[in-house]
Image: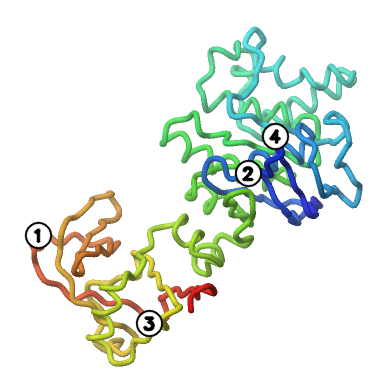
Amino acid sequence: MIRLDGLEIGFNRKAVVQNLSLDIRKGEFFTFLGPSGCGKTTTLKAITGFLVPTQGSIHVNGIDITHMPVEQRKIGMVFQNYALFPTMTVKQNIVFGLKEQKWPKDRIRTRLEEVAHLVNLTDEQLDKPITELSGGQQQRVAIARTLALNPDIIVLDEPLSNLDARLRKKLRGELKRIQAASGVTMVYVTHDQEEALILSDRIAVFNAGAIEQVGTPHDIYYRPASEFVVDFIGEANRLHPSTVARLKQSNADFELHSRERAYVRAEHVKERIPERLAADYYVLDAEFEIEEFYGLNVKRIFRVDDEQIGCLSNEVDPAIRRGDRKRLYIGKSDLIRFTDRHAP
């Protein structure tokens, strides 16, 4: 549905986005994920028409929209600050665009009922001034206003970042439900990896103006294409030289090429395993340092010489003390390896 081909966007002769190509499918919840300043919002602005690329093209349903005016693109936008009219009621905010486009009154009334139901806004809420609604309710109004115009695509730029953690989690589910029910294509920008993994059909991981990887949340997490991706998403341990040396001492079959670097996710570091599975694991001797409690999970940090290795577990160990020696187990198939092409 959306095709970006060789996109380059620059400011003051400096390229912010470089040679970016990407396909987004119809009806997909697609997320641009990456740290601040990586080019994800800049790319979104090019799709919506607020920025014109210096090179490359943007197509929607086969039509070149690279230089098309914003208002002709049929792309709805939900902003970080909602951009609602504070002097209007909820209902007036939602139907504003419909009135501007001179929809008949009966169609406006029908469409208002449809989108209000879709985003769980009650009749009582529709008559309230927008300023009387909570942040989460205002976010739903912003989405309803955008959906009302039947856009082919909706783009959302960090739409939950102004909300508290509890409300963000609640609205994630709302967003996914709304997108699935409406069938609209959503392009979502966030720096929050958890948000991206929960919401997305597919994710593009941005880094320094380029895309490191495009894939499903499962692919991105378990089959990262680069060291940036494995380090940015989830809890991962890089196996430093001292840890590698210990693994080689303890496991005759452990091999790591001089040009390779290895990572293991914290949940794949085990403190105990069934004896029948021992052949599937490497053994690592370590010293317990500290425990971090997260509610459902506990992260225990161990030391191997001068390096730390984290272990995520759902089991509390009240008997463990700082300095205790422990055996850790790393699944042989859980090692994530990267080859340094520049190494000798």
Label 1, secondary structure: give it. loop
Residue 185 shown left or right of residue 100 in the figure: left
Q: CA distance from mark 2 to mark 1?
A: 43 Å
Structural distance between the alpha carbons of marks 3 and 1: 28 Å
Disc 3, SS: helix
Q: Nearer the viewer, residue 327 or 298?
A: 327
Tag 2, which secondary structure?
A: loop
Q: Amino acid at mark 1?
A: Arg
Query: For the point 86% across and 24% down, which residue is it?
Result: 107
N-term mark: 2 or 3: 2
Mark 2 — residue?
39
Q: Is residue 245 left or right of residue 60?
A: left
Of badges 1 and 4, nearer the viewer stands 4
Q: Residue at x 87, y 42 (%)?
A: 65
Looking at numbered disc 4 in the image, what kind of residue is underneath it? Asn
Residue behind mark 1: 322
Compare residues 169 and 52 and report the one nearer the observer.
Answer: 52
